[in-house]
């Protein structure tokens, strides 16, 4: 009897955990997009006002934030500083690959980052600013959409987890 | 043996070109004054007296392609073209070590002025040398008293060692020269092209003396006035005067009681008279000394030193005149 109860509790707990993990992913995406936006805004300042070279500007722009987005920027900055032969785009693509499980971004924002990489460092400050503004604008749009998806899905995932766990228990009992 | 410029030049060259250069004899590398990379042309090294085309493993001339030029540019700008906006307008970039990288390509013009360059086709890397003691032969003519210096204009065509001599003059005049009982003066260098002091992040990477302040990357005219106001130098050293505002600033500095040593492009003093603004300086006899240089037998050879006020020849390489300064 007790073994059944413990087993049932474990199944319910697993269901809840799965639900919460799925919900965390939906929660995390808009947060990382916001962090990206703030990094890109600082990057714009470092490029435009202090005219820092790209490796230093990228490293400086992620100061003050934590987590995978910071790792993405510092990783790209390191790559560019250590091997000046690679282009910013290659550095971005490699960093995205390295941080795969942690960077909870989806294809639209990842594509945006890759094209940003292709356009960094090739034009003058003024054009650079325009481009970064455009990217920030697009990120803002993506964020709105990500927040909507989050609102729709977070609660559903949690309920689904709990209910799924209960369902399995009921079926098995 | 390590060639002194390897440390600063190799980081801006693609690896296969470094490989080719490393195979060359020390004699060639020691004489190197320019590396010229032109699209679809051989990789050319300009030595002291002749040019040398670099050969590849098969013994044929190595022909540069567009990717070589792009790679050099990528390495110099560290993937950040925007940091060099101003420099690109001028057509050259100064890299750590004070080496000047000249660029040619397609100019983009907006409103009658060059906005930037694109589609680069040629790169010329000019190796800067720090030759301590190269101004020894000029120093006696430049020093007036133990604290005063003659206003001097160093005149020569390009590639005769003007900048190298200015750098050594700055070092000697600011440190002091015991031999002439010269105690050293406060020197201000306006280094518009970061060539004299070869500054890296504002700090000189070559020895320019212990009493020297460097205004790096600052336009000459504005810089000279800024230095007079802020650092109260006794001597201002600057390179390649030519524009109207430069000439005005030199006049201002001289009238403020500051000595000036500058350089100008010309082969003779008479040639300077044909140049629109520098002409004023010559006509008004604002300088005390003209120092003329030539590149034969080696860059930095002094041909004449002229006392301007009396038009007396203080030193002449040809006739062997040598009046102690």
Image (cartoon, rainbow, N blue to C red):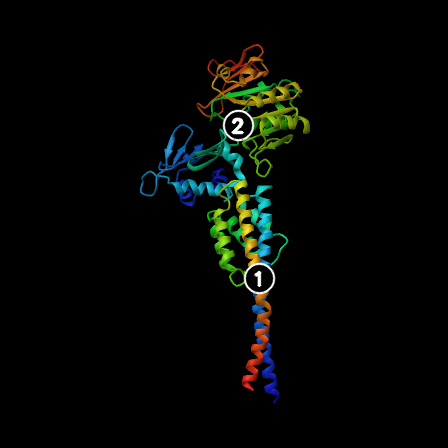
Which residue is under mark 2? B163
- On the image, which quarter does residue A159 sit in? bottom right
Depth check, front residue: B324 or A124: A124
Depth check, front residue: B152 or A55: A55
Q: How many marks?
A: 2
* Residue located 57% across and 69% down the image: A21
Which residue is under mark 1? A148
In this picture, residue A51 sits left or right of residue B59: right
Helix, strand or loop for disc 1: helix
| Tag 1 subunit | A
Helix, strand or loop for disc 2: helix
Q: Pointer 2: residues within 10 angstroms few (<14), some, or many (20+)?
A: many
Q: Nearer the viewer, mark 1 or mark 2?
A: 1
* Residue located 58% across and 13% down the image: B285
Question: Is residue B22 in view from this perspective?
Answer: no
Depth check, front residue: A120 or B181: A120
Instruction: Using the numbered discs, state the Cα–Cα distance from disc 1 to disc 2 in whole angstroms.
Output: 64 Å
């Amino acid at each position: 009897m007790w073994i059944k109860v413990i087993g049932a509790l474990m199944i319910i707990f697993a269901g809840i955990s799965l639900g919460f993990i799925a919900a965390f992913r939906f929660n995390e995406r808009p947060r990382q997009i916001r962090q990206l936006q703030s990094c890109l805004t600082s990057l714009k300042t470092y490029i435009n006002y202090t005219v820092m070279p790209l490796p230093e500007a990228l490293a400086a722009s992620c100061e003050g934030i934590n987590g995978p987005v910071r790792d993405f920027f510092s990783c790209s900055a390191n790559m560019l500083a250590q091997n000046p032969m690679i282009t910013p785009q290659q550095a971005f693509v490699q960093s995205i690959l390295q941080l795969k499980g942690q960077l909870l971004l989806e294809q639209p924002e990842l594509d945006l980052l890759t094209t940003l990489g292709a356009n960094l460092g090739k034009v003058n400050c003024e054009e650079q600013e325009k481009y970064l503004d455009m990217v920030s604008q697009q990120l803002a749009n993506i964020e709105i959409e990500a927040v909507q998806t989050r609102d729709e899905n977070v609660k559903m995932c949690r309920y689904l987890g709990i209910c799924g766990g209960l369902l399995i228990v009921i079926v098995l009992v | 043996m390590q060639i002194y410029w390897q440390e600063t030049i190799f980081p801006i060259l693609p690896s296969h070109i470094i490989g080719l250069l490393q195979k060359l004899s020390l004699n060639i590398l020691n004489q190197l004054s320019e590396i010229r990379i032109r699209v679809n042309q051989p990789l050319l090294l300009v030595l002291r007296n002749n040019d040398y085309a670099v050969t590849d493993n098969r013994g044929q001339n190595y022909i540069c392609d567009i990717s070589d030029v792009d790679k050099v540019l990528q390495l110099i700008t560290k993937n950040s073209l925007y940091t060099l906006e101003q420099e690109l307008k001028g057509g050259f970039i100064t890299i750590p070590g004070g080496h000047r990288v000249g660029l040619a390509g397609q100019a983009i013009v907006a409103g009658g002025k060059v906005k930037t360059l694109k589609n680069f086709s040629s790169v010329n890397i000019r190796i800067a040398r720090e030759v301590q003691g190269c101004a020894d032969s000029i120093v006696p003519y430049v020093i007036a008293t133990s604290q005063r210096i003659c206003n001097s204009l160093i005149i020569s065509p390009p590639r005769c060692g003007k900048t190298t001599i200015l750098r050594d003059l700055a070092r000697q005049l600011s440190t002091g020269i015991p031999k002439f009982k010269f105690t050293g003066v406060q020197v201000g260098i306006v280094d518009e092209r970061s060539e004299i002091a070869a500054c890296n992040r504002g700090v000189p990477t070559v020895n320019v003396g212990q009493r020297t302040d460097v205004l790096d990357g600052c336009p000459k005219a504005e810089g000279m006035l800024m230095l007079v106001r802020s650092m109260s130098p006794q001597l201002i050293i600057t390179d390649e005067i030519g524009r109207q505002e430069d000439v005005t600033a030199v006049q201002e500095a001289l009238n403020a009681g500051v000595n000036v040593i500058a350089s100008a492009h010309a082969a003779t003093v008479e040639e300077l008279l044909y140049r629109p603004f520098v002409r004023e300086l010559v006509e008004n006899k604002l300088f005390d000394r003209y120092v003329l240089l030539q590149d034969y037998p080696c860059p930095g050879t002094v041909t004449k030193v002229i006392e301007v006020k009396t038009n007396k020849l203080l030193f002449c390489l040809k006739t062997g005149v040598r009046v102690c300064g």
